[in-house]
Image (spheres, rainbow, N blue to C red):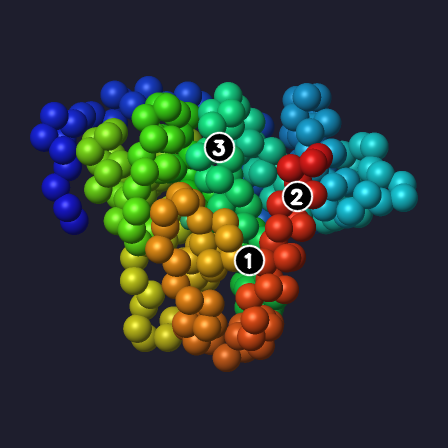
Amino acid sequence: MEKRGKDVADLPWAHLHLPPFPQVAIRVLQLANDENAQLERLCDLISTDPAFASEVLTVANSILYAPRYPSTSVLQAVTVLGANTLQGMCITVGVRAYLGKAMSYPAMRNLWRHNLACAVIAERLAAVGLIDRDVAYTAGILHDIGRIALAVVQPKDYAALLESHRGSPVSILAGERNLFGWDHCETGIQLVGDWKLPSELEPIVSAHHDARRTDGAWNMAELIKISCRMADATGFPAFPGCETTPYSELLSELPARERRLFDSEIAPLADEVAKRIRAIECA
Ligand SMILES: [Fe+2]
Ligand SMILES: [Fe+2]
């Protein structure tokens, strides 16, 4: 690990003064992943915050691509989409709300799109059935939560770093440590603890820029590592000067079953990701 900048090297965590994540989104995340048990609780929970509920409904209707009969209640949406998918929508709305004013910076909108792209690709990669698709989507949205938090704390300086940095996805971590005393992976793991998020998120937020395991293991953490780089390659990098891995190389890193889910050309995937992002952004 590279050394932190001299003057920020010992900054305590509290120094960052991170605003709290939307409470309703945290409570949704803490619900057990049990479709039946959570259905009613999820509806009750979302309905406690009417503004949040209405945003979730708009996003839920957008992913159904302008349904003829849009859902007008959380209960309807949960019936159409299922509790786990609606949970993913809640987290999407929560992250967007958390970014708030920081979204006025183009660099932060890129960051947001990178997370959405990672989520869409993670969901697709989970389609083989060994990993839950909705959990994969949520993990994708949250993998860079540390970055989102840094963006909220100091949007101007962080936007300048994101816009000027050139190099591999991992190379920006040193710049973040120089700027904040913490990089986004360290920030992410701290947030999982502070916000009492499910501990399964720890390896995802902290190690998504680590090298892939060489023993062929395939689990959520490995799935997110590659989804993040595929998001970069499909035109949604976390920062514009990010070096991307050639698509053919990314495909060769996938287990054979997952590789079959993708066309050998990148264009169909890039189109699908762009379409999903547009649908959510227009909501
Ligand atoms: Fe990251
Ligand atoms: Fe990423």
- Residue 195: x and y in percent read 42, 31
As drawn, 16 above or below 5: above
Quadrant the C terminus occupies = top right
What label does residue 50 carry, if any? none
Report the residue at 62% width, 45% height from top. 277
- Residue 278: x and y in percent read 66, 43
Q: Which residue is mark 3?
A: 106
Q: Left or right of 23: which side holds 151? A: left
Nearest to N terminus: mark 2 or mark 3: 3
Residue 148 in view in this figure: yes
Residue 37 in view in this figure: no
Q: Secondary structure at mark 2?
A: helix
Crowdedness near tag 3: few (<14), some (14–19) or many (≥20) residues, C-alpha within 10 Å: few
- Residue 256: x and y in percent read 50, 79
What label does residue 278 carry, if any? 2
Q: Which residue is mark 1?
A: 121
Q: What distance separates the C-alpha of mark 1 from that of mark 3?
A: 22 Å
